Image (cartoon, coloured by chain):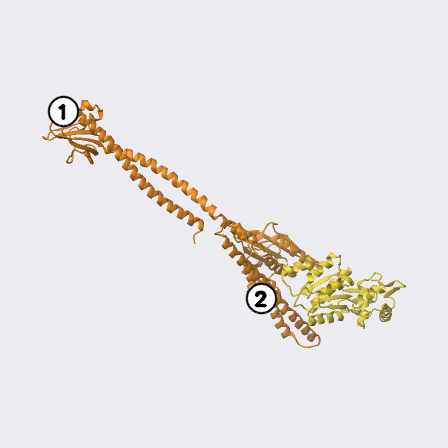
Chain colours: A yellow, B orange
Amino acid sequence: MRVLLAEDDPALSDQIRQALVQEGRVVDAVKDGEEAGFLGATEPYDMIILDLGLPKRDGLSILREWRAQKNDIPVLILTARDGWSQRVDGLDAGADDYVTKPFHMAELLARVRALLRRRMGQQSPLFEAGKFSFDTRMCRATVEGIAVDLTAQEAAVLTYLVNNSGRLVSRTELSEHIYAYDDDRDSNTIAVFIARLRKKLGAEVIQTIRGRGYKIDPA
Amino acid sequence: MRSLRSRAILWGLGLSALSILVGAVVLVTSVDDIALRRFDTDMAALHLQLTAAVASGELNADNIAKELSDPLYERPYSGRYWQVTISDGTIITSRSLFDTVLVVPAASPELLYSNGVGPDGAVRLAWRKITPDGQAPMVVAVANSMAQLYAEQWEIRQSLLSGFAIVGLLGLIIAIFQTSAILRPLSTLRKDINRRWDSNERLDPSDYPEEVSPLVSDINTLLERNRDLLERTRRQSADLAHALKTPSAILRNELSRFENAGQAVEVAEDALGRIDAQITRSLTRVRAANLGAPSKRGANLHKSLERLDRAFATLFASSEKTLQLNVPSNLRVSMDQHDVEELLGNLLENAMKFCRNLVVVSAHQTAGATVILIEDDGPGIPEEDRIEALRPGGRLDTATRGTGLGLAIASDVTNAYGGTLSLGESPSLGGLQVTCSLPIRHGL
């Protein structure tokens, strides 16, 4: 799952990025409002974490512009502006959640997960299909109750497929959601990740529809 | 200080009463004088008649009475008398004098007037010394009862006084109208200020009389300075919030990294929690203390609650909790809208967090206050902890654990507006009931 993180404080941005990456997210971190506005409007993110007091452009105006353009990517506002009028204004502008600084990282991550699940129409953080189960909270896969070790990219591919379970996901779509903006995108490597995942989880978990893409079916 | 209106009316009344009094005294005196002169003129005519009667024939009472032919001279004590005192001491009088005589002062050939005493009280005397042809010198006097003059003077005074009373009453009415006409620009100014207090509109000095327009310019300057100050305070507190909260968030994350690495960070986390709570509460207090005064238009309570309701619908989207608003749509509170939302947002967040399923907000107006009730079906707060939960400057981190910082912040905002916040048990839902009473200010 690919997340846009718009936060101008480098230390805080790093902390959040690391925490998200540990959960198997792919993160594009930007430090100003102009870049955030552009990326949010042009890249297919699964969600956006938006600071309001950004240099060059205010977060609220960016959000309003996205919503005016029918862009419905879930947006979580993360800001020091903790007045209730400001929260209402933020949510009225189209935000899906509002977290004020200082925050507990665990709470932020939980709310990011909840937004992603809501986006995918899932209620439970635990996905199960036969012997395979995947906990989106901890990004942990098990087969017959035994934990499976995954690399960051494998986890990213699996998270995206699980969050879109029951739906065919093309290689291009997958690459758009598991690579950051600056990454070298090679859709051939996707096939490599899928092959490794099959090996670790069992061949039946991920179906390949030749020439079209991949699919995970819920039990 | 007494109001301009009552000062103007009282001074106007005092001065016009004084001028009416002086005018009345002067006028009454001169009118009395005119009446007396007219009376004396009549007396002179009577005296002339008597002199003619005395000179016309034999000098005796009957002859004179016949000549005068006025029945009043015949009726005893009628108020009209004559008397002839001959130099040999003989006194001839009208019948009206009956058995008395008039005391006539020393006479001269000139006709003299004076007040004297007659048989029926005070009289006006007119007398003169004459010497008719072939007769001895004599003093011829007529007297008229003053009662007639007094009655005449009284009648004139009465009509004068009722005239003055009407003039005075008219003056009073005119003074009231005049005062309100003169003071109208001031009340217009007051309304204009109330209307434009919260907006950035300037008052136009040329809309007011030249005596008031410098005041309007000064008010403009004051309002602008006040707005600037508020804006600066808001900006500064926002800057301060940002400056403090971002590093605090970084520290917190670092602490949690240490904790994950197996280090003991509980004491540091506790201290950081206290710093965070103090920052949040102090900034709210700074804002509320600055905003406690200026809102004259107030805010629509229902509108603010609807805005918050939308926010809570998003924030609690995944829960089954319901927020129910029973607030009349036209109810206003004498508060800045930001502060109403800060107050209610904190109270509602607390209620939504701790309720099982339901939070109900209701409001009504009493004689001097708008009362807002927020009830929930959660566990409530034990009676012994309620005061501590609201105590200004209380130990926020520990004392309010389980109730959140929201109650203390809401209490600060309410206090800044001179209101009261109290906690109790909801009779209908069983959980916490927060009663927030906000005074209604004049001009709302």
Chain ID of residue with mark 1: B
Q: Position of residue B326 (x, y in %)?
A: 62, 51
The number of numbered discs placed on residues in the rendered structure image is 2
Mark yes or no: residue B178 visible.
Answer: yes
* Left or right relative to B248: residue A175: right
Tell me the mark number nearer the camera, choosing from 1 and 2.
1
Number of other residues with Cα within 10 Å of mark 1, as a class: few under 14, some 14 to 19, many 20 or more: few
The quarter of the image holding the N terminus of chain B is bottom left
Q: Residues within 10 Å of mark 2 (few under 14, many from 20)?
A: some
Farthest-out residue, front? B133
Name the residue: 73% across, 71% down: A18
The kind of residue on which mark 1 rests is: Asn
Q: Mark 2 highlights which residue?
A: B282
Q: Is residue B82 above or below residue B389?
A: above
Q: Which residue is mark 1?
A: B60
Q: Earlier in the sequence, mark 1 or mark 2?
A: 1
Residue A7 x %, y %: 70, 67
The answer to whether B78 appears left or right of A126 in the picture is left
Kind of residue sitting beneath label 2: Ser
- The quadrant where residue B247 appears: bottom right
